[in-house]
Image (tube, rainbow, N blue to C red):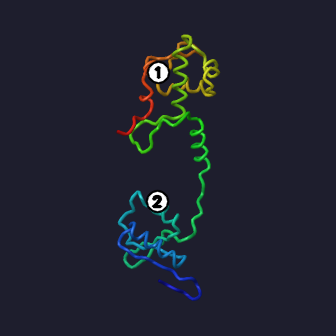
């Protein structure tokens, strides 16, 4: 603890490593005083988690100091957390959420391709081509499926499901036929055993 004149007291919790017990101790000290620092020995080099750890301490309103050879280096001052919203990222996430039909993805899985709104639209276009006439235009497919970006999906052909035999005409490729014939489980993550 340190006090200077009439300024509010300052608390510094010093430990040998930045870990959960130290963070919990700092949070407990915030119940007594506003200015709480955590202090640790200066690591030889910071790991890739430095940014995540400082973000956590910033959210908790804790400060961070490092000590080396009797010298103290401040990294973060304690202050009330005021989040900055990433409105562009939030808008993209909401747009993707609203474009999806249902949620075929299973949470908590890794290493599995996610079913996105784009993939759902591509599957709907492939299904329309599978039952429709031989070659169709993007405009006809857009009206039939209600997918406004049908032309872009067909042109990009991200999954290799569409062939382009003539200008403004698209057909289903063998890969697209296989995708349409595949059971729905092949397009969504398999359930957790």
x, y percent for residue 133: 56, 11
x, y percent for residue 57: 48, 66
Q: Secondary structure at mark 1?
A: helix
Q: Are marks 2 and 1 in contact (CB under 8 Å)?
A: no
From the viewer's side, name the closer residue of 102 and 167: 102
Question: How many neighbours does mark 1 have within 10 angstroms: few (below 14), some (14-19), or many (20 or more)?
Answer: many
Dot label at residue 57:
none
Vertically, is 56 above or below 101? below
Vertically, is 36 above or below 176? below
From the viewer's side, name the closer residue of 46 and 137: 137
Disc 2 versus disc 1: distance between alpha carbons? 45 Å
x, y percent for residue 28: 47, 74
From the viewer's side, name the closer residue of 138 and 99: 99
Vertically, is 181 above or below 21? above
- Relative to residue 90, is residue 24 drawn left or right? left
Question: Which numbered disc flags the more N-terminal residue, 2 or 1?
Answer: 2
Q: Residue at x 46, y 59 (%)?
A: 51
- Residue that numbered label 1 is attached to: 180
The image quadrant where one finds the C terminus is top left
- Residue that numbered label 2 is attached to: 51
Q: Residue at x 59, y 42 (%)?
A: 92
Q: Secondary structure at mark 2?
A: helix
Q: Residue at x 62, y 22 (%)?
A: 142
Vertically, is 12 above or below 6? above
């Amino acid at each position: 603890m340190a006090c200077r004149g009439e300024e509010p007291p300052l608390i510094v919790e010093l430990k040998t490593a930045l870990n959960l017990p130290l963070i919990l101790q700092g949070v407990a000290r915030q119940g007594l005083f506003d200015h709480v620092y955590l202090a640790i020995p200066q690591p030889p080099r910071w790991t890739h988690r430095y940014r995540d750890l400082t973000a956590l301490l910033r959210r908790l309103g804790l400060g961070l100091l490092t000590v080396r050879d009797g010298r103290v280096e401040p990294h973060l001052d304690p202050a009330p957390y005021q989040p900055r919203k990433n409105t562009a990222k939030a808008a993209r996430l909401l747009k993707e959420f609203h474009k999806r039909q249902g949620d075929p993805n299973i949470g908590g899985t890794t290493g599995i391709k996610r079913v996105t709104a784009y993939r759902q639209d591509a599957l709907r276009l492939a299904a329309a081509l599978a039952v429709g006439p031989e070659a169709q235009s993007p405009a006809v497919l857009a009206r039939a499926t209600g997918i406004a970006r049908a032309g872009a999906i067909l042109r990009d052909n991200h999954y290799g499901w569409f062939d382009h035999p003539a200008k403004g005409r698209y057909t289903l490729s063998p890969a697209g036929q296989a995708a349409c014939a595949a059971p729905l489980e092949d397009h969504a993550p398999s359930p957790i055993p």
